[in-house]
């Protein structure tokens, strides 16, 4: 039997090493020391805004097909800078240090293969990473049309656990606003609308059961979205005390209109992805950091999340599908 590798420890050591031996990474983490943060308290949750000039490239990344085909993929192993160390993860993935951090510890977890960002087939890997990088990291996924800056190369990311506000506010959101869609001895599925975000959560101890629950969710969401491609979502994976907790944010739009505003004074460069809606909104411009208000944030969230009617319909569908498809204890 193969010896169990402590990936969490390996990843933390990798960050320490790369901050010393890779200039770009050292600079990136040094920038993080000077970021400014402000916190908005909403009715049910808190959202931080981080002024982080180091994130300009990711925030403004062009993700249209033409731009993607014309650039060199920065997640392919052959294109990595020489100083970037690669840790192999199981057969098909690697662990890299993200040189443009938002978190005190920030990893990029790409596939070894240059294959499209897609959660339907890679969801089990998100579960593996969440478990193997616990107790220190939360893992996340950005859909190809709502936040992934490399939609052409399958990848996840991981960051310091409890850095996103939802990591520690989730329990309270669920008990206050969660609607139980399904429950048996080992699996719980909730829908939560916290007045800012629409989400589905899946909690459980059995990997296969969570995978099945995700398949049921995926197919219902895809049907209700009426799209042939992957329906828009961002996912957070969290593992604690032998239990996975998966939060799925339901999206209808990538960037808000204010991102494209022609008048620079009115423009706000906020490109909402998993970390932003998980509670740490990143603005690479100081003027946007200063200008952003609670009301503007609320408007941006409302614009990029699915509406109340779609959410209601999806939760009704899910309730039916879960009853039909899952036999307790199976
Ligand atoms: Zn690639």
Image (tube, helix red, strand yellow):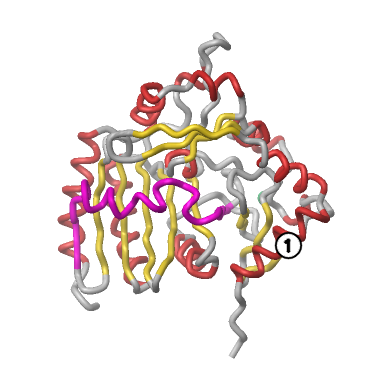
Q: Is residue 33 above or below residue 215?
A: above
In percent of width and height, residue 27 lies at 77, 42
Residue 304: which quarter of the image? Answer: top left
Residue 322 visible here: yes
For the N terminus, the image quarter is bottom right
The answer to whether residue 118 is magenta is no
At a point 24% along the width and 37% down the height, the residue shown is 310
In percent of width and height, residue 282 lies at 54, 34
At a point 54% along the width and 62% down the height, the residue shown is 136
Q: Which residues are magenta?
A: 154-183
Among all residues in the image, which is located at the extreme bottom?
1
User: Which residue, given by chain and number where applicable, does mark 1 sit on?
Assistant: 86
205 on left or right of 186: right
Residue 219 visible here: no
User: The residue tagged with tag 1: helix, strand or loop?
Assistant: loop
Residue 232: which quarter of the image? Answer: top left
In percent of width and height, residue 273 lies at 48, 39
Q: Please name whichever residue, 50 or 272, is drawn nearer the observer in this view of the structure.
A: 50
Q: Is residue 201 above or below residue 300?
A: below
Q: Residues within 10 Å of mark 1 (few under 14, many from 20)?
A: some
For the C terminus, the image quarter is bottom left
At a point 30% along the width and 63% down the height, the residue shown is 213
The answer to whether residue 162 is magenta is yes
């Amino acid at each position: 039997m193969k010896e169990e590798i402590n990936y969490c420890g390996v990843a933390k050591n990798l960050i320490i090493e790369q901050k010393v031996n890779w200039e770009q990474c050292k600079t990136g983490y040094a920038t993080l020391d000077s970021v400014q943060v402000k916190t908005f308290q909403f009715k049910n949750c808190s959202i931080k805004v981080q002024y982080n000039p180091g994130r300009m490239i990711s925030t403004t990344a062009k993700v249209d097909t033409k731009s993607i085909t014309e650039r060199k993929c920065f997640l392919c192993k052959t294109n990595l800078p020489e100083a970037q160390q690669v840790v192999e993860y199981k057969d098909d993935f690697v662990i890299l240090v993200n040189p443009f951090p938002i978190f005190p510890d920030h990893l990029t977890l790409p596939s070894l293969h240059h294959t499209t960002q897609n959660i339907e087939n890679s969801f089990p890997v998100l579960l593996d990473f969440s478990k193997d990088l616990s107790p220190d990291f939360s893992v996340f996924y950005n859909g190809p049309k709502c936040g992934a800056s490399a939609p052409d190369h399958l990848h996840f990311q991981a960051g310091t656990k409890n850095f996103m506000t939802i990591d520690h506010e989730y329990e309270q959101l669920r008990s206050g606003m969660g609607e139980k869609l399904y429950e048996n001895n080992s699996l719980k599925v909730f829908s939560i609308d916290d007045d800012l975000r629409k989400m589905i959560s899946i909690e459980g101890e059995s990997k296969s059961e969570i995978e099945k629950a995700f398949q049921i969710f995926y197919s219902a969401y895809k049907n209700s979205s009426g799209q042939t491609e992957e329906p828009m979502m961002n996912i957070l994976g969290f593992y604690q005390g032998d239990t996975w907790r998966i939060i799925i944010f339901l999206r209808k739009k990538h960037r808000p209109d204010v991102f494209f505003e022609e008048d620079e004074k009115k423009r706000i460069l906020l490109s909402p992805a998993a970390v932003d809606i998980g509670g740490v909104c990143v603005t690479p411009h100081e003027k946007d950091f200063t200008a952003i208000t609670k009301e503007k944030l609320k408007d941006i969230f409302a614009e990029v999340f699915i509406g109340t009617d779609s959410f209601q319909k999806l939760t009704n569908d899910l309730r039916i599908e879960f009853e039909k498809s899952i036999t307790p204890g199976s």
